[in-house]
Image (spheres, rainbow, N blue to C red):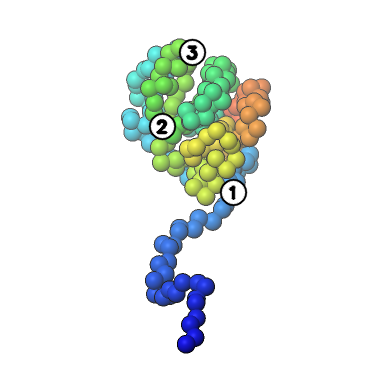
Amino acid sequence: MLTTNNKYPFFDLSEIVADADLPFKPYQPLKPVKAGNFIPGLKLYNDYSRWQQFFNGAETHGPVSLRHLLNKPLVIAFYSHHWREQGFNLLKQLNNIHNEIKASGGNLLIISDERTDELEKKAWENSLTLNFYYDEDKEIARAFRIFSENDPVWNRFSGIDVNVPLLATYIIDPSKQVIYSHIDWDFLGTFSAGDIISSVYESALIGNSKKSA
């Protein structure tokens, strides 16, 4: 009687269980807005919980006039505490030129993704005079195209494991046109203070000329 030994064990194809389909997210690289672009989707809300203001390190409370803020050249900087020291260096540089921005006819606003006790401590220790607007849903960051789920920052930067907006600084005029843009891609430094001040001054001068015409 002949016998046959199977080298491989027998199995039924019906026993195969297919893995659940994994969600597919196409890679779409960030394409941040540049000088010359318009930001029609920029919206700020007067909701008190979205705003935090510091004067010489102390938190202040008062009404926010969006009309006053937006009718001048506006320096907008995106900050997140997840950028650690590099992010805080950006705040210190902006704090150093805040008075010059105002004297040149502009305003300054920091857009942050999260309110933290750490910021209040650092603001006090470093006598910061800055205004913050909290954009937890990252609506403004999306409008500037510096945040997307399809191109998280950890694809570009090591040491950060939370997807947050890029460290970016912009200036927009009252028509919401970008007149200056800078993104700290390489951590070699942030913006040129001179470029910020001159861009604000020139934009304010043009705006005042149009009003008086």
Distance from the alpha carbon under mark 1 to that under mark 3 = 36 Å
Distance from the alpha carbon under mark 3 to that under mark 2 = 20 Å
Other residues around mark 2 within 10 Å, as few (<14) / some (14–19) / many (≥20): some
In the figure, is residue 36 to the left or right of 153? Answer: right
Residue 115, by quadrant, is top left
Given the current orientation, which residue lies at the most extreme front position? 1
Q: Position of residue 171 (x, y in %)?
A: 57, 32
Q: Position of residue 100 (x, y in %)?
A: 58, 17
Q: Say which mark, if any, is on residue 130.
A: none
Q: Nearer the viewer, residue 137 or 202?
A: 137
For label 3, the residue is 126
Q: Position of residue 144 (x, y in %)?
A: 53, 42
Q: Amino acid at mark 1?
A: Pro
Q: Amino acid at mark 3?
A: Asn
In the figure, is residue 28 to the left or right of 44? Answer: right
Q: Nearer the viewer, residue 113 or 63?
A: 113
| Earlier-in-chain disc, 1 versus 3 | 1
For label 2, the residue is 114
Report the quarter where the C terminus lies.
top right
Q: Residue at x 40, y 67 (%)?
A: 17
Other residues around mark 1 within 10 Å, as few (<14) / some (14–19) / many (≥20): some
Q: Amino acid at mark 2?
A: Glu
For label 1, the residue is 29
Q: Residue at x 44, y 74 (%)?
A: 10
| Earlier-in-chain disc, 1 versus 2 | 1
